Amino acid sequence: MGIFFKKMSEKETKNWKKGCVVGFYAFLIALFINQIYYNFFNSYFLSNFSVFWIGLISAFAWSFILNVKSVKRKGK
């Protein structure tokens, strides 16, 4: 797999794990909001597609933010 992807450092691996946790909680919050909205208005607030992307983007975004912060700290 070294041909297509670079090997992640230990810090990047830790940041990705933290991003996964944030993404999981974003999934839970989006699903909770969607269910509460359904209980009150009998229609869904978010589509399944948007719930999926909310969780996925939040995981990648948080991982990216943590990686950028650690590179900036390393450079100082």
Image (cartoon, rainbow, N blue to C red):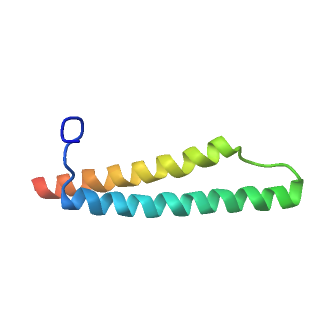
Answer above or below: position of 33 versus 2: below
Foreground residue, 68 or 7? 7
Q: Position of residue 57 (x, y in %)?
A: 48, 46
User: Which residue corresponds to the image point at 29% horizontal and 63% vertical from the top-left?
Assistant: 14
User: Which residue corresponds to the image point at 18% horizontal and 53% vertical from the top-left?
Assistant: 72
User: Which residue corresponds to the image point at 31% horizontal and 56% vertical from the top-left?
Assistant: 66
Relative placement, left or right, of 20 versus 76 is right
Foreground residue, 36 or 56? 56
Residue at the limit of the structure toward the top, as seen here: 4
Relative placement, left or right, of 62 versus 36 is left
Q: Where is residue 11 in the image (x, y as percent from the top left)?
A: 22, 61
The quarter of the image holding the N terminus is: top left
The quarter of the image holding the C terminus is: bottom left
User: Which residue corresponds to the image point at 44% horizontal and 53% vertical from the top-left?
Assistant: 59
Relative placement, left or right, of 66 versus 20 is left
Q: Position of residue 31 (x, y in %)?
A: 67, 58
Residue at the limit of the structure toward the front, as seen here: 1
Relative placement, left or right, of 5 versus 46 is left
Q: How many marks?
A: 0
